[in-house]
Amino acid sequence: MTTIINGDGLLLGRMASIVAKRALNGESIAIVNAEKAIISGSRARVLSQYGQKRSRGSREGGPFFPRRPDHIVRRTIRGMLPYKRPAGMEAFKRIRVYVGVPSDLAGSPMETLEEAHMNRLNSPKIVTVGAVSTFLGAKF
């Protein structure tokens, strides 16, 4: 049984850490509306940090940083897993991330993570993962 989490209005880092922990415990998780997840901070600071990541290394040899919102969320979750070890690899395979809501998951009950919701923020400065993705040049 797959747990479906709606990423709309959730803080990216908090959501990623919760999902990583649950995946390590053997749970299969699907995240929908990944482009609506939120990164806290001023737009200029967030976009400059993601821009720096893209300019690191060589274009041919990596490191490779994603542009699509679902790949950005997946990469963030991967950073919170021991993905080079067998347990981390298995946990990472149990995680699915989607832009929007796919037709096969449309009628299913969705869970939202209260401990990762944007209501926790004191500052109104936020950027969606979709905006970061568009800034990086994704065509999602």
Image (tube, helix red, strand yellow):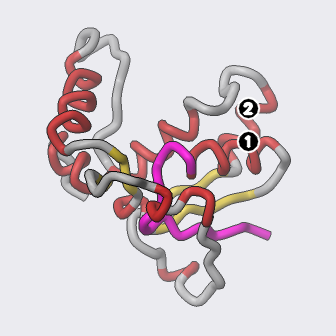
- Look at the image and tell me in which quarter the N terminus lies: bottom right
Q: Is residue 73 magenta?
A: no
Dot 1 crowding, Cα within 10 Å, few <14, some 14–19, many 20+: many
Callout 1 amino acid: Ala
**Residue at the limit of the structure toward the front, as seen here:** 122
When the figure is inspected, residue 13 is found, relative to residue 104, above or below; the finding is: above
Q: Which mark is residue 103?
A: none
Question: Which residue is rendered at x = 76% and y = 50% of the image?
Answer: 22
When the figure is inspected, residue 85 is found, relative to residue 116, above or below; the finding is: above
Callout 2 amino acid: Gly
Secondary element at tag 2: helix
Residue position for label 2: 88
Residue position for label 1: 91
Asked whether, in this view, residue 66 is left or right of residue 109, the answer is left
Asked whether, in this view, residue 23 is left or right of residue 139, the answer is right
**Magenta segment boundaries in residue numbering:** 1-14
**Residue at the limit of the structure toward the bottom, as seen here:** 107
Q: How many marks?
A: 2
**Does the rendering let one see residue 59?**
yes
Secondary element at tag 1: helix
Asked whether, in this view, residue 122 is left or right of residue 2, the answer is left
Nearest the camera: 139 or 34?
34
Question: Which residue is rendered at x = 43% and y = 60% of the image?
Answer: 34
The percent coordinates of residue 133 (x first, y second) are 25, 48
Asked whether, in this view, residue 38 is left or right of residue 96, the answer is left
